[in-house]
Image (spheres, grey):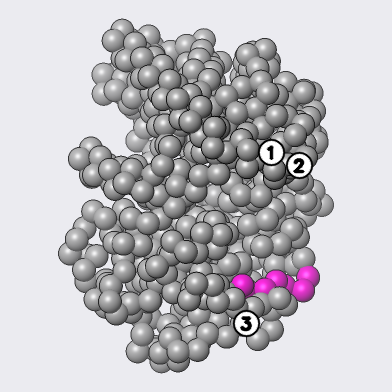
Amino acid sequence: MLSQHKVLVVTGGFLSGKEGSFFEVLKRQILQWQFSKFSWLEAMVKVTSVEPIVYVQSSVKKTKDQRVLDFFKFNDLNSTPELTETLIATLLKQESMDFEVASVNDLFSNRKLRERLLKECDCVFISTTLLRDLSEMFPILNLLKTPKNHLVVGGPLTQLLKENIKYMDNVEVVAIGHGEYLVPTLCEWIKTDFKELKPHPTASGSKIENLNNIQVLYSGHPESSNLDMFPAADWKLAETYHQKKFPVIHYESVRGCPYRCSFCNYPFLFNENSFRYRSAQKIANDWETYEKSMGPKIINCLDSLFTMPRKRLFELCEEIQKRGLKSRWVCYARAEDLADEEVCKAMKAANILQVQIGLESGSPQILDNMKKHCTLEENIKAVENCRKYGITSVVSLIVGFPGETESTIEETYELIKKTKPDFFFVATFSTRAAGVPILSVENRKKFGIWIDENVFSVSPYWEHATMSASEVGKNVRKLQLRLMREKHSLNAFAFYSGMLGYKPENREALLDFQAASVERFQTLPKFFKLAVSFIEKRIQRDINKLKVTTTATTDKQLA
């Protein structure tokens, strides 16, 4: 029997790419800017990311090459709901709690839908999985709060919310940790008509803090490293309430990470630093259930590291073959694992489609600064093995990390030139994630790092001994356009929508199309170059202002 209460589950990014018009994008961007502070670096990141998309998407409309047109017809990934939405819906159903689901985009774009859902639902669960800072959070809170409903916020941004709890007037509960413990606890609170919130009765470390009249609920942790006791997201349920089929579904088998790369906060997202994972048997059981109830899918594994432990990976590949499963899958992997040819061979035999590899840099020194514990030689071998076994390779690169210079960026260029992965992402170094090792007191001293402690920008300003936020944009732009023009790899931002439908035999045609799309414009590159130059000056101006007021404080902190 369902409760008299109803929960609205809200997921998605502030800007998702699914907005109905340019006007809608602009309106939402203005809303965010009203809460932003010192956000020129964020503007730089958007400009450098959008430029290749503009070239490629504008050229798609002009091309007659059927191979290119077929690539962009495959857009199944964008139709799939977030894993968070489906998992929370699964957990709410188990608790006999009535619910509705909606994306942030749905609620901003469709007023009638928003008004109906907020009238029907007296509690709102807001996921911050795809939200990046408080300037994106606040417009959503203002949109969803009514005099009669109760707002609960959970997900990766909760630590930042907790640290800035004084700004959270509309929020009743900040929920930190594992959803499998949080959702039953919150449902019990809802069933008391929101009068009594208690810690989870069995989870170790579950507790509640009252901060500024807001309740901070900690889920607690499993006693073991095994995640098999947690249910998998019920994608059949998702297809039922959305009334449509999803060719691509998401899956999670790992929480935490055994590595401590200096730029990454993933190991600490669940308010702990343990590495937990599902067994190969559990994963195979879940995938077999999906296949039997819905047919073969593309399973998008969202784990930070699916290829660890390696023994589990080999066991899973054997189970997939033994059971005759047909679903293809996508995962993140470390280069050192893929450098082992036997790993790639086993994954290919088990229907792997695509891997995303964090190469990050072609400079051994930068890799060392990042504490990657992965060599340049392993990076090279990983991409070579993927090509040998027909596994689509998507590599990520970071520009601007402490120690970065034009020389180390050139080493990154040479790495991509040599290995020629299928797709590449270029990310700008960011200090947004709280608690990352590179921002420790020791590392700030070692690399001469200064940062703006700004919680109202997706991309706070930074400087270090060898590069500044005011310089990084031109370096990002130069690297990605050079790789596109010279046909070394496909820009993943520009080709994202069709990546899961990529066919290796069409690689050369797509590379030719990409290079031509960059070269066909004469005025646009000049515009983007001027925009980057303009933003650089604004960033440096802001940094100069901020350093006057923050340097003295920082010196005291580092003393």
Can you give x and y, in whole percent of width and height, for residue 70 in the image? 36, 30
- Nearest the eye: 296 or 4: 4
Tell me where residue 530 sits by quadrant. Answer: top left
Q: CA distance from mark 3 to mark 1?
A: 42 Å
Q: CA distance from mark 1 to mark 2?
A: 6 Å
Q: Are marks 3 and 1 in contact (CB under 8 Å)?
A: no
Q: Earlier in the sequence, mark 3 or mark 1?
A: 3
Q: Which residue is mark 1?
A: 555
Amino acid at the residue labelled 3:
His
Q: Which residue is mark 2?
A: 559
Res. 135 visible in picture: yes
Q: Which residues are magenta?
A: 218-224
The answer to whether 148 appears left or right of 151 in the picture is: left
The residue carrying pointer 2 sits among few (fewer than 14), some (14 to 19) or many (20 or more) residues within 10 Å by Cα, namely few
Is residue 299 a member of the stretch shown in magenta?
A: no
- Nearest the eye: 379 or 208: 208
> What SS does tag 3 mark?
loop
The residue carrying pointer 3 sits among few (fewer than 14), some (14 to 19) or many (20 or more) residues within 10 Å by Cα, namely many
Amino acid at the residue labelled 2:
Ala
Q: Which mark is residue 200?
A: 3
Q: Quadrant of the N terminus?
A: bottom left
- Nearest the eye: 545 or 344: 545
Q: Quadrant of the C terminus?
A: top right
Q: Earlier in the sequence, mark 3 or mark 2?
A: 3
The answer to whether 190 appears left or right of 301 in the picture is: left
Q: Are marks 1 and 2 in contact (CB under 8 Å)?
A: yes
Amino acid at the residue labelled 1:
Asp
- Identity of the residue furthest to the left in this view: 112
